[in-house]
Image: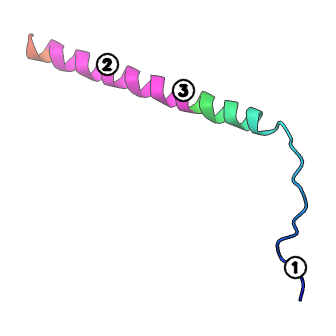
Amino acid sequence: MKKTDDKKPVPSVSVTTSTGNSTNWRAWYWLVLGALAVEIGFFAYLTRLFA
């Protein structure tokens, strides 16, 4: 029988930082865009409420 637990070591490559930064940038982009949309909606709601 062959051993199934002898795996080759995975070399450590610093590629995860670049992909992590791009996803982090996209997350911040959507967070800021969503917060801006909520703020505009809340402002429009208040102006109609007190108009």
Name the N-terminal-most of marks 1 and 2.
1
Determine the residue positioned at 89% across, 56% down: 9
Identity of the amino acid at label 2? Ile
For residue 20, side relative to residue 47 (left or right): right
* x, y percent for residue 4: 83, 77
**Local crowd size for mark 2, using a 10 Å CA cut-off: few (<14), some (14–19), many (≥20):** few
Marks 2 and 3 sit apart, C-alpha to C-alpha, by 17 Å
Residue 6, by quadrant, is bottom right
Residue at disc 2, secondary structure: helix
Image mark for residue 23: none
Identity of the amino acid at label 1? Lys
Task: Report which residue position mark 2 lands on.
Answer: 40
Mark 1 or 3: in front is: 1
Determine the residue positioned at 31% across, 18% down: 40
Task: Report which residue position mark 3 lands on.
Answer: 29
For residue 2, side relative to residue 16 (left or right): right
* x, y percent for residue 46: 16, 15
Name the N-terminal-most of marks 2 and 3.
3
* x, y percent for residue 50: 8, 11
Q: Would you place residue 49 above or below residue 12 in this image?
A: above
Asked if the magenta segment contains residue 24, the reply would be no
Q: Would you place residue 2 above or below residue 17 in this image?
A: below
Instruction: Find the magenta span and give its range.
Output: 27-47
Task: Report which residue position mark 1 lands on.
Answer: 3
